[in-house]
Image (cartoon, rainbow, N blue to C red):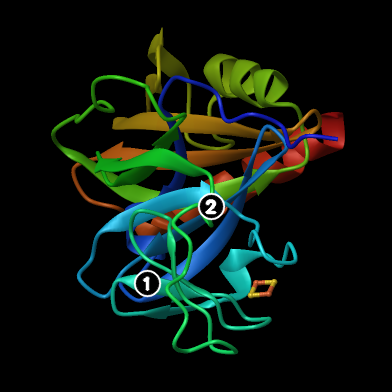
Amino acid sequence: MSAPAVPPGWTAVALARDIDAGTSAGVVLGGAEIVVWRDTGGRVHAWEDRCPHRGMKLSFGFVRGDRIACLYHGWEYDGTATCRYIPAHPDLAVPASIRVERYRAAEASGLIWVAAEGTGGAPPEVAGLVALRSLFVDAAAGDALARLAAEGFPGLGPVSGVEQGLFLRFTQGGTAFAVACHAVGPGACALHVLVAGAADAALIPATAAFRRAVEGAA
Ligand code: FES
């Protein structure tokens, strides 16, 4: 069975600050498993989270300079997602056909965005937004966004100025929020919460209360 496809439009999958240079993370976007990694030069990459050799998750691997090495047998892939080194055959000229499926990856508005190869343009760069947190919720993306648009985060007062685009934007308690959402699967999603101005840690409990409320209603 083939893996779920990454959608063609730009989707935010993580806060940029959560993927340090020289590290990798696995994310799931609509069932598609993706490794998001940042080389030691700071450039971000997003590929299918599967080594072409025996299928190990590349997100379990190690970043070495501008390559990521698979945990299992150490095959190394460069930034073009092409295998360049096989430790068991160090003198082998590795066939260029050994490649990982690659997606577009970009940073904007403090987020890492992913899109299928061939997607044009760039994700939205909105000035003045600061990342607060990512919030993983056991509820369908549509349900979580509908509740957030209607009620906002618990305890912060009435919601106003709701706009829905790539971000759900609204104001609550004098704070302007912008929330990007990606579906993890049919009953789970991740909300990437940005605020205008400064990221106030006092807002974190309200986001946690939102998760409890929406999961309790699911
Ligand atoms: S499974 Fe990745 S190198 Fe073998």
Please tell me whether mark 1 sits on a helix, a strand or a loop: strand
**Viewer can see residue 147:** yes
> Looking at the picture, which amino acid does disc 1 mark?
Arg
Please tell me whether mark 2 sits on a helix, a strand or a loop: loop
Read off the residue under disc 1: 67
Q: Position of residue 130 (x, y in %)?
A: 25, 46
125 to the left or right of 147: left
Q: Position of residue 180 (x, y in %)?
A: 45, 31
Q: Residue at x 60, y 89 (%)?
A: 88
Choose between 67 and 29: the one closer to the eye: 67
136 to the left or right of 23: right
Choose between 37 and 111: the one closer to the eye: 37
Q: Position of residue 25 (x, y in %)?
A: 53, 64
Read off the residue under disc 2: 100
**Viewer can see residue 134:** no
> Looking at the picture, which amino acid does disc 2 mark?
Val
Q: Residue at x 86, y 35 (%)?
A: 1
Q: Residue at x 54, y 76 (%)?
A: 75
Badge 2 crowding class, 10 Å Cα cut-off, few under 14, some 14 to 19, many 20 or more, is many
Dot label at residue 201 = none
